[in-house]
Image (cartoon, rainbow, N blue to C red):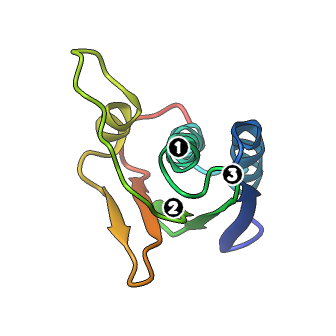
Amino acid sequence: MITANLYAGVFHGAPDQIGQVRGAVREYLNGCPRSDDVVLIVSEFATNAIRHSHSRGQFLIVRAEVFRHYVWVGVQDLGGPWHPRQRDGRPHGLDILAALVGDNWRTEVTSDGYRITWARVDFGEASDG
């Protein structure tokens, strides 16, 4: 059962924090449809923030909010250059994300250079969450 409308947490920008991010979001989503998908998505976003932004060694912010028909989840990092990986014919995390939510996700850059990557996960789509 959802006990709060909004979750927000600040995590150290280190790989060992990904499990903490997943656990915190899973706890917040307790009983929510598609929670497994949301946890997978936030894990991918947090991993990318740590690997590909100035958040590595610093911090990142994770937010999730449950609405009547969907969950919104996002990770804010400290920005920096983005170097997309060369395609090698196999799916990667963002390909899996697109399979789960289609084009219901974005990466936006704030006026102060922070990057927010977010997704909307509708409850009507297939999942075992």
Whole-angstrom CA distance, mark 3 to mark 1, is 26 Å
Choose the circle earlier in sequence order: 2 or 1: 1
Which of the numbered marks, if any, corresponds to residue 34?
1
- Alpha-carbon neighbours of circle 3 within 10 Å: few (<14), some, or many (≥20)? many
Whole-angstrom CA distance, mark 2 to mark 3, is 15 Å
Of residue 47 and residue 4, the one placed in the foreground of this image is 47
Of residue 38 and residue 86, the one placed in the foreground of this image is 86
Residue at disc 2, secondary structure: strand
Residue 69 visible in this rendered orientation of the protein? no
Q: Position of residue 45 (x, y in %)?
A: 50, 48
- Whether 71 is drawn above or below 111: the answer is above
Residue 126 sits in quarter: top left
Choose the circle earlier in sequence order: 2 or 3: 3
Whole-angstrom CA distance, mark 2 to mark 1, is 16 Å
| Location of mark 2 (residue) | 74
Q: Amino acid at mark 2?
A: Gly
Residue 37 visible in this rendered orientation of the protein? yes
Residue at disc 1, secondary structure: loop
The residue that appears at 77% across and 68% down in the rendered structure is 3
Viewer-nearest of labels 2 and 3? 3
Q: Quadrant of the C terminus?
A: top right
| Location of mark 3 (residue) | 13
Q: In the drawing, does residue 114 fall left or right of residue 105?
A: right
The residue that appears at 66% across and 74% down in the rendered structure is 5
Residue at disc 3, secondary structure: loop
Q: Amino acid at mark 3?
A: Gly
